Amino acid sequence: MSDYLKHPEYVALSETVREFPLDDAPRLILSDWLEDHGHDPEANFIRWQVLGGAYQHPVEIADAAVPD
């Protein structure tokens, strides 16, 4: 289990996500917090969920834009 799961800010943000399940804002705030604390895969997964699977990591977008 990761240490961040017990961090007071993470716990508070997670509770807010659970209290407002139809609101994307708390999820995006949580994803920003995760990214700020070095948990990029988790942050990107949440963004992908919020955007209905349409989210691409900025590096993937840049790579896709470069012609072969």
Image (cartoon, grey):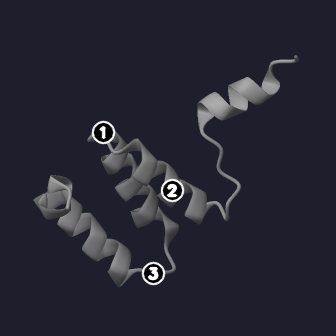
The residue that appears at 20% across and 56% down in the rendered structure is: 2
Residue under label 2: 45
Q: Position of residue 24 (x, y in %)?
A: 51, 67
The first of marks 2 and 1 along the sequence is 1
The residue that appears at 20% across and 67% down in the rendered structure is: 12
The residue tagged with tag 1: helix, strand or loop? Answer: loop
Q: Looking at the picture, does residue 68 appear above or below residue 20?
A: above
The first of marks 3 and 1 along the sequence is 3
The residue that appears at 71% across and 55% down in the rendered structure is: 54
Q: Nearer the viewer, mark 3 or mark 1?
A: 1
Using the image as rendered, state which of residue 68 and residue 29 is in the foreground. Answer: 68
The residue tagged with tag 2: helix, strand or loop? Answer: helix
Image quarter hosting the N terminus? bottom left
Residue under label 3: 21
Q: Position of residue 43 (x, y in %)?
A: 43, 51
Judged left or right of residue 12, residue 36 is right
Q: Nearer the viewer, mark 2 or mark 3?
A: 2
